[in-house]
Amino acid sequence: MYNKILLATDGSEHSIRAASHAISLAQVDNGMIDIVYVVDGETSKSDVLHSVDKYEVKKEREEMLQPIKMKIESAGIASELHLLHGEPGPTIVEFANENHYDLVVVGSRGLNKLQTLVIGSVSHKVMKRVDCPVLVIK
Amino acid sequence: MNRVEKIKYEWFGNVRGDVLAGIVVALALIPEAIAFSIIAGVDPMVGLYASFCISVIIAFIGGRPGMISAATGAMALLMVSLVADHGLQYLLAATILTGILQFLFGVLKLATLIKFVPRSVMIGFVNALAIMILTSQFQHFKGESWIMYSMVALTLAIIYLLPMVTKAVPSTLVAIIVVTAIAVFAGLGIRTVGDLGNITSQLPVFMLPEIPLTFDTLMIIFPYSLALAIVGLLESLLTANIVDDMTDTGSNKNKESRGQGIANIVTGFFGGMAGCAMIGQSVINVKSGGNGRLSSLVAGVFLMFLIIALGGIVVQIPMAALAGVMIMVSISTFDWSSLRNLHKVPRTDAIVMIATVITVVVTHDLSKGVLLGVLLSAIFFAAKISKVKVKSYATTDGKKKIYQVDGQIFFASVNDMVEKFDFTESINEVEIDLTNAHLWDDSAIGALDKIETKFEQNHVKVKYKGLNAESRLLKRKIGGLSKASGH
């Protein structure tokens, strides 16, 4: 049923947990899982400031997401990593809709009410505006 | 893409996004240009003209489309004593000279030199900049009433709380409008921009700085220009890297250096102060959808339009509102992750970062902080790399001893290495294994010669093993020169 799954991640513990749910769903139908990570403006600023050059920036981001990719691949599932740039919410929505995924799996950071009010919730935006079903992992 | 297509794409590939983002940036630039002028000790028009000229010129000749350049805090902070001691005309001359230096930097393709500035120095640079912007605001608080303090607090509250409700309008602009309206209608009588300088509703005109063209003048402005040129390029190239990453595209750093140079030269002739690229504004621009050359042009033109149309209102902006905006600029400039990770990064990196910050705060000169940071990093690097490990073991018959040398052998490490050899043992032969070592300079060869000589004095034969090709070449070229003669 879900052959083409998109796993939206920020590299955190929560998103590693989201990965295991994506894996169990993909295994049902022999599907594949793409990983998407969105670099926003603030992350760009601090990553560039803390790295020697752009190759190191790219390497560090890929290394950060390596555990998730390994986890998926060791379950025997094909996976591709996409590093995108922009506001996380809209960028994930656009990418998911353009590439026609069957399902988007996204981790929620488990913010409290005030934090949600202040920094907003990416998972909420994704849930509302992606065309396909969305699974939010709490 | 051929040349014409590329130009077309850089200018008109994103017209709607660029125009909207340019307008947002123009609105954010005005309070900053005024506040940075006040920091430098000049009329607000000097910063506004600079922001207009620089952003318009950079739109055409910059190397990084989508990056915003204008009057900046980093540059303003360097000018304070020049303006205080010698006045505006010397600042304009220094601005022109800064541009010439930056242009030469670009022509000589020296932009790659930025890689010799370690990241801990760059982090120290932005943190020091943030602290300096904050402390530069303290003068506005001196002897003020609680009304002024509460207006600053209101400005900050609107800036940080409004985005929770809506992100459709820039919260900084709303804060300035609300605080200005309150001050005007309630007749608070707090200090305004108008109390510190004039806003003239006219376009900048070309003029030569009124300074004596003598060697003495050059000696006054050159140190300032050099510092401005270095700091300007450092911040511009750092910003270019950030915009590269945000837009996932590349840029031409040497072209950007030349562009910054030309922009500053022209700005100096049109009565503006030296500027450079701005991290904060560039991030705002890209986030608002701007990524082409048009965004920088729109920002500059719209800024000038607003000043001409609304100059009478701009002078009524209370200093409290500007101080609030500057506090926000300071907070967002500071690299907070460097504090969180301070205990995690190597200790020497932390020391370099903190030393850079302290130097800037004490000397009020960003370029001195960078210089000290680079020097300190170089010393730490030399200290780290000059650690040489020497392991020794004897063969079973006790006649031969093998020394295994690990590390970089050069002027800073040779003393360490030589001390680890024991020349007094009664053995017949010594083997020096250099498989994991690299000989770098004549000090290295000299040290080996010295070791050889000392062993030979005790009639011990010395053999080498595992020299890599480059080291062998070096040893053959200069080996034996420093050895005692007669061998």
Image (cartoon, coloured by chain):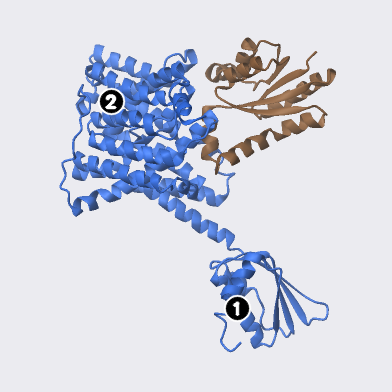
Chain colours: A brown, B blue
Residue at 66% of width from left, 29% of height from top?
Answer: A12
Say which quarter of the image contains residue B267: top left
Distance from Cα at disc 2 to Cα at disc 1: 71 Å
Q: Secondary structure at mark 2?
A: helix
Residue occupying image coordinates x 60% and y 78%:
B449
The answer to whether residue B213 is above or below residue B430 is: above
Looking at the figure, which quarter contains the C terminus of chain A? top right
Q: Is residue B366 visible?
A: no
Mark 2: few, some, or many residues within 10 Å (few <14, many ≥20)? many
Pinpoint residue B253: horizontal percent, then vertical percent: 45, 40
Chain label for disc 2:
B
Work out which residue is located at the far bottom of the displayed protein and give it.
B486
Determine crowd level at label 1: few under 14, some 14-19, many 20+ residues with C-alpha closer than 10 A. Answer: some
Q: Which residue is mark 1?
A: B449
**Residue on which disc 2 sits:** B319
Q: Is residue A67 above or below residue B110?
A: above
In the image, residue A93 sits, relative to residue B145, either above or below, namely: above
- How far across and down, in percent of the image, does residue B110 sit? 43, 48
Type of the residue with mark 2: Met
Residue at x-position 57% and y-position 67%:
B413
Counting residues from the start of the chain, the first of labels 2 and 1 encountered is 2
Residue B429 vs residue B126, the one in the foreground: B429
Where is residue A124 drawn, in percent x and y?
Answer: 62, 14
Residue B373: percent from left, percent from top: 45, 51
Q: Nearer the viewer, residue B177 or B450?
A: B450
Label 2 or label 1, whichever lies nearer to me, is 1
Q: Chain of mark 1?
A: B
Which quadrant does the N terminus of chain A fall into? top right
Same subunit, labels 2 and 1: the answer reads yes
